Image (cartoon, coloured by chain):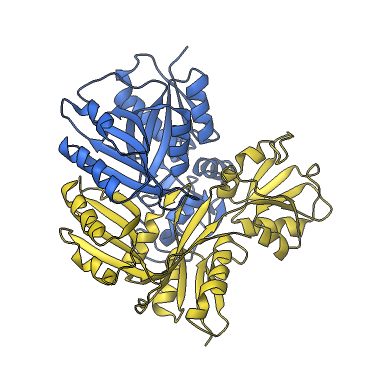
Chain colours: A blue, B yellow
């Protein structure tokens, strides 16, 4: 059986790109066989495939630099008791893509996913990348950026464009009329790579993701931070999440990096927490730009 | 001129409901006249209206219990130098609504916004509220839950339903076939109420939202938390956000509640931060369920 990796979406989506980058960059550590990518309809399906269906890895988006943490995916991860074995940070770029005979002046209607449309409001409102102005585009909603690209390719209409990735333009034989049309260039999505079992100890696996609950703030939180500081752990994330219906009780998400010899013990040293779960130790990842 | 409040969306959306709840509950403190609600296309437009167009208040969603903080709205708030003068927490409930002559068995196609469809996957997959099973529904995408309700009302087709709020069912004269069909009942959205000027000091305004940047963790973060602890401030939120391109530099979002006499001085006592911005002092708000 081939080595299988599950992601949410369809081919040429941003998740699909992230999965391919992870395969090219990191997967030689895990397998020498050529992996198979499986697109799922929901994040729940990724968890299910990894847990029960002999799918080796899953790719779960966990936070975005504009939209914040995706708590619902933290919940899935926690409930499933899966391990985090890697991370990948992808910079999201949007392009206006269209049939070969179209031009910036011929496009009147743009198809995309609502999220992508929302991220390109300045461009849609008439601000072109060269600073010039034109009439606002008519916006039409598609189920995904890939669906939008497929529809525009199929219609082959001078007036139709799609907002999607450059990869989608290649896959559907469309031209790129404008690149990087997103309002905010700092648009990054961080994915966690999940598996059934944690990784074995290894010097490169210096990053750890944990979650814990506390009843009292700030005393208990300071104690946790002190333990991490004593072990020279560098925090890379701290986030509180209110437990609704339980005033002043919180769940925390903390990531830290430590290359000290005793780093695997840090998670056992944290006292005064109500509950503690270690998601996993893994190699910190530099970010990749979407292509 | 009437007292005007800006929200993002269209009438009968969840933001519109939140604005109405705030008007009924809190607005008597600010005005005795009947306010006018202004729906905008984007969050940027809310900021613009409050800053320049004599719109008194704006309602900005800032975090959701499943989707996390909305950093892009924190960015808007910071860039605009507006003040937070209130908060409102709304529990989001979805309903299946349909024309009067339809029934649960006659519906085959469901229209809604992709986000609402995503939040009701179990129901869409065939799990009815009474535990029974049926065939999965065909899902069709609309620009918003309100647009879906309007379309279903207009078509008046036995086979069409919309996922939207109960309020939308009333507005478009549709019946509610199933209530609370969301997968996760803990679905809350927190809105900040923003204005040009901060509120005057008042014993009820015990909650404060701040943002700051730090170069060093954990030492500097512990110092900030210590200052808050010394003044008996209860943290209700702490969140780090990586500054991309600046490894190990972070922006923090902290909310705290303090009823001590010197509470207005806390924000000036916090040292060792690179930058500090106080969004405002306001009355902490109990949450409201969407109707």
* Residue B168: quadrant of the picture: bottom right
Q: Who's the residue at 28% across and 46% down the image?
A: A221
Q: Which residue ends up furthest to the right in the rendered image? A: B101
Q: Which residue ends up furthest to the top in the rendered image? A: A1
Q: Nearer the viewer, residue B204 or B20?
A: B204
Q: Is residue A178 left or right of residue A107?
A: left
Residue A145, percent from left and from top:
50, 44
Residue B213, percent from left and from top:
22, 56
Q: Who's the residue at 23% across and 31% down the image?
A: A266
The quadrant of the image that shows the C terminus of chain A is: top left
Asked whether residue B289 appears in the rendered view, the answer is yes
Residue B95, percent from left and from top:
67, 51
Q: Who's the residue at 54% across and 54% down the image?
A: A159
User: In this figure, what is the number of numbered marks?
Assistant: 0
Residue B91, percent from left and from top:
55, 55
Q: Nearer the viewer, residue B21 or B147?
A: B21
Q: Nearer the viewer, residue A161 or B200?
A: B200
* Residue A202: quadrant of the picture: top left
């Amino acid at each position: 059986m081939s080595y299988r990796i599950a992601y949410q979406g369809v081919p040429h989506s941003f998740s699909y790109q992230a999965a391919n980058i992870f395969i090219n960059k990191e997967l030689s550590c895990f397998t020498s066989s050529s992996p198979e990518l499986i697109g799922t309809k929901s994040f729940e399906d990724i968890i299910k495939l990894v847990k029960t269906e002999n799918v080796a890895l899953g790719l779960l988006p966990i936070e975005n630099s504009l939209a914040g943490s995706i708590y619902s995916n933290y919940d899935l991860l926690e409930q499933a008791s899966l391990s985090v074995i890697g991370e990948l940070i992808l910079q999201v770029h949007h392009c206006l893509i269209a049939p070969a005979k179209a031009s910036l002046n011929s496009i009147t209607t743009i198809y995309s996913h609502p999220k992508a449309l929302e991220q390109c409001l300045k461009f849609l409102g008439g601000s072109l990348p060269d600073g010039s102005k034109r009439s606002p585009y008519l916006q039409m909603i598609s189920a995904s950026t890939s669906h939008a690209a497929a529809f525009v390719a199929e219609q082959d209409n001078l007036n139709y464009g799609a907002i999607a990735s450059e990869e989608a333009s290649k896959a559907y034989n469309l031209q790129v009329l404008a690149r990087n049309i997103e309002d905010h260039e700092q648009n990054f999505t961080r994915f966690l790579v999940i598996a059934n079992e944690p990784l074995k100890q290894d010097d490169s696996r210096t990053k750890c993701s944990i979650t814990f609950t506390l009843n009292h703030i700030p005393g208990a939180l300071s104690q946790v931070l002190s333990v991490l500081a004593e072990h020279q752990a560098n925090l890379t994330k701290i986030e509180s999440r209110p437990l609704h219906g339980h005033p002043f009780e919180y769940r925390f998400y903390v990531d830290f990096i430590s290359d000290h010899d005793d780093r695997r013990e840090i998670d056992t040293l944290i006292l005064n927490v109500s509950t503690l779960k270690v998601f996993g130790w893994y190699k910190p990842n530099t970010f990749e730009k979407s292509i």
